Amino acid sequence: MTVQNTKRFFVASIVFFLWFVFFPCVAFFFVKSSIARAASVGETSVSISKNTTAIVFWHSLNATQTNILKNSLQRFTKRTGILVKLETGMDLRNGLLKQKHYGALPDVVLGTADFMAIGKEVELSSIPIDFIPRDVGSRFVKELSLDNVSMGVPLFSGNHLVLYSNASIVSSPAKTWEEIFEQHAEIKRKGFLTLALPVGEPYFFLPFVLQAGVFADGVLTPNLQNDWDKFAKALDSYSKLITAEIVPSNCSFSCSSTDFLKGKFAYTVSGDWLFADALAALGSSLRVSDLPSLGGKPMRSISSTQGLFFPGRSLYGSNKSALQKLVRHLLNSSEQYEFARATGRLPATDTAMEKIFRLSLSSENRELLRIFKESQPMRSTRESILTWMILSKALEYRIQNVAPTSAIVETLRVQTIRRLQQYREEIH
């Protein structure tokens, strides 16, 4: 063999070794490592067997709350060996309806009471009597019940809207919407935006509707009867925030949270879910206060309970035992307390709630709790899905300025009567 051929053979041997031996071994090592990492939740190493139960858990918590939930689930997996796969980033309601069509529903969803409105469509499991610990507040259990049947397991409450303000921009928070309009020019002159509010979201429009006298009994019934004039008044008041440029017309959830935390806005209307992040971002400049009054009448904050819902009748499937263990873990008083203490959310269990109220809290945290105590709990019916449709369509038509308010409301009134009749025929 010549020297040249020897060199060629040597090079070919090296290539053969790298391509067919070394690279596959390295790839196998990384794949094996990835599988090992995937077999644990977060950073906790858990011994996983082939027969390990896995629970698919949907939620829409923000980053801070997600990390706290992950830590809790790490403890759960370490203790029970049951894996929990957290999935987020989707529209929960539409996602459930879509996944039902494909037969790929999650085992459990963390959502609000209005999920019960699509209970039939996604086959929500009714909750057995012994499934909810006695320590869970009766008010919260009632809020997640439909026709006296429990449809969800309360996890935490609150979800109440408040007015957050940045004291470095406005030294004294506005007490009325009229005052915010008066402050607008000065705030703009300083180089800031006035108010962040996700204008297209029905939940943020609802306090204006309640303040106008609609849904006075706290029940989200779509049958407004003689309240359509009041609804029109609320829609006009809300839309003035956009037309006067108090709120950017394209403001979304990101605008009302991230941009406020970055110091771009003087105010934001948001829920208790923002409190921990707002306190971390603004520190002593954060102020928490009631929603501003309008026309001399107070605007009461609404509140709701968030809980665990079980689509696809998962509570009666192969994962029933694992799901019951998960419920007991998340409603353990220590887990409830830790989540509430770190996020500002309110726990569902009486023991954890009492412990939270005994804490030495900051003035802003106490204000957040006071507003919750005075908030209006909202109750859903099977027809409430149509109520959210009314609110959503009203905002869509108003933001797009497709017609005067009177024409929009009349269109919605006719649509509601027709859809309400169709809906009642479908469920009977």
Image: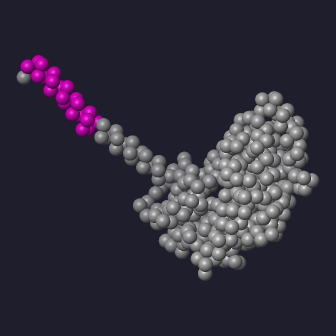
Q: Is residue 423 above or below residue 8?
A: below
Image height check: is 400 above or below 320? above
Residue at the left extreme of this rendering = 1
Q: Position of residue 427 (x, y in %)?
A: 60, 77
Q: Quadrant of the N terminus?
A: top left
Vertical position of residue 87 compared to residue 7: above or below: below
Magenta region's main secondary structure?
Answer: helix
Residue 378: x percent and y percent? Answer: 76, 65
Is 250 on the left-hand or right-hand side of 375? Answer: left
The stretch drawn in magenta includes residue 417: no
User: In the image shown, does 21 or 404 lie closer to the viewer?
Assistant: 404
Instruction: Tell me where the magenta segment starts and ends, as one range.
Output: 2-22
Number of labels in the image equals 0
Q: Residue 407: name its quadrant.
A: bottom right
Q: Residue furthest bottom?
A: 428
Residue that appears at 88% across and 47% down: 176
- Quadrant including the C terminus: bottom right
Q: Residue at x 69, y 63 (%)?
A: 412
Provide residue 370's location: percent of width, then percent of height.
86, 55
Does any portion of residue 223 appear in the rendered image?
yes
Residue under the point 50% across and 66% down: 100
Relative placement, left or right, of 149 versus 373 is: left
Judged from this view, the residue extending furthest toward the top is 3
| Residue closer to the observer: 371 or 70 | 371
Is 67 positioned to the left or the right of 268 in the image? left
Membership of 17 in magenta stretch = yes
Residue 20 at x, y = what percent? 24, 38
Relative depth, front residue between 17 and 217: 217
Residue located 84% across and 63% down the image? 213
Question: Can the viewer see residue 355 in this picture?
Answer: no
